[in-house]
Amino acid sequence: MPAIDRKYSKSIIDAACRVAKAVKARALLAYVDSVDDLEQLQACVKPPTELICVIRDQKDQLRIPGTKVKSLLVPGFNLTRMGQIKMAALMAFTQQWLTRDDVFVFLTGVAGQRLDTMMVMEVGLEYELFHSVDQPKLTEHIRRVVFQRALNLALELAHEGREGKPVGTVFVIGDYREVRKHCQQNIINPFHGYPEKQRNILDESMKETIKEFSSIDGAFIIKGTGVIMSAGTTLRSALPGDELPQGLGARHAAAQGITAATRSIALTISESTGMVRIWRRGKLITEIEKAPPSPVAMGTPRPLPPSDPANS
């Protein structure tokens, strides 16, 4: 990293630590691949603030000083700065490292080049980011590792599409006994008849199968344990929810309706924009926007590695 960028990064780290102390932040989250001097960062973060290192590649884990610092592994896709913050904060929220009314400071920037962004937020006041503060715990009916894998797949499809063409689809994850009451199969279910262990979203070998069926009109229905129950499924729930943002159509209305009617979470991928939206209890929780192509690349997408179900 050039000297000018190191000086730039040092100034932002110093400022972030001063702000964290002043507001008694619950946590300071930082993307490791944007920080040149992690020792400086760790040294200046003082209790009650906790340092959480956000990593997009498991190799970055080796750069984290000490063993007591928490690390949060997120998909390494090219997102806007706000998209980076939303995704990492949401995953920290699902890990219960952030809770309602917590204040946190966030540091991010261009991977491998320089730190350039600091943001301060309070969970519950940042309406656009945390619509989910009054929601029940994710583990009520969905394993966290299953949600994280579905989010990773949704982001990968949003960025890569299928065979170079954009796709739009829906993942519905949750209590299948409730969800199936609001479903109608459009096509012969391609997952019917296979043993559950062979159609679990946590199985890395299922990725290409999911991508192949993502072009089929309809939703993927997934149990909270990760078992894929169907694809090409129509969602028939018509329960009223919040008014949809302008420009959102039937796919998003279906995601809103099914999550209002059942204990489930829905992830939608917009075919036109590549925006990934997350829905729960009939509400839009958050939107994750991919960054437009730019001369300064943030690195190639690095999907999360297979998770060990035993550690979820």
Image (tube, rainbow, N blue to C red):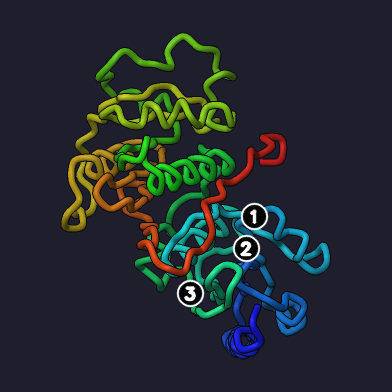
Label 3: how many residues lie within 10 Å, few (<14), some (14-19) or many (20+)?
A: some
> In the rendered structure, which amino acid carries the disc numbered 1?
Asp
Secondary structure type for disc 2: strand
Q: Which residue is disc 2 drawn over?
A: 54
Label 2: how many residues lie within 10 Å, few (<14), some (14-19) or many (20+)?
A: many
Of residue 90 and residue 30, the one placed in the foreground of this image is 30
Q: Disc 2 and disc 3: Cα gap in Å?
A: 19 Å
Image height of 122 relative to 250, above or below: below
Image height of 24 relative to 160, above or below: below
Q: Residue at coordinates 44% horizontally, 48% vertically from top-left?
A: 155
Q: Nearer the viewer, mark 2 or mark 1?
A: 1
Q: Give the quadrant of residue 260.
A: top left
Judged from this view, the residue extending furthest toward the top is: 193
Q: Disc 1 and disc 3: Cα gap in Å?
A: 27 Å
Spot occupied by residue 43 in the image (x, y as percentages of width and height): 77, 82
Q: Residue at coordinates 73% horizontally, 84% vertically from top-left?
A: 44
Q: Which residue is disc 3 drawn over?
A: 122
Judged from this view, the residue extending furthest toward the right is: 66
Which of the image's four quarters has the N terminus?
A: bottom right
Q: Which residue is disc 1 drawn over?
A: 57
- Disc on the earlier residue, 2 or 3: 2
Q: Nearer the viewer, mark 2 or mark 3?
A: 2
Label 1: how many residues lie within 10 Å, few (<14), some (14-19) or many (20+)?
A: some
Q: Residue at coordinates 29% horizontally, 40% vertically from top-left?
A: 168
Q: Give the quadrant of residue 46.
A: bottom right
Spot occupied by residue 217 in the image (x, y as percentages of width and height): 26, 29
Of residue 75 and residue 196, the one placed in the foreground of this image is 75
Q: Residue at coordinates 42% horizontally, 12% vertically from top-left?
A: 192
Q: Viewed as shown, does residue 215 lie left or right of 307?
A: left
Q: Nearer the viewer, mark 1 or mark 3?
A: 1
> In the rendered structure, which amino acid carries the disc numbered 2?
Val
> In the rendered structure, which amino acid carries the disc numbered 3?
Glu
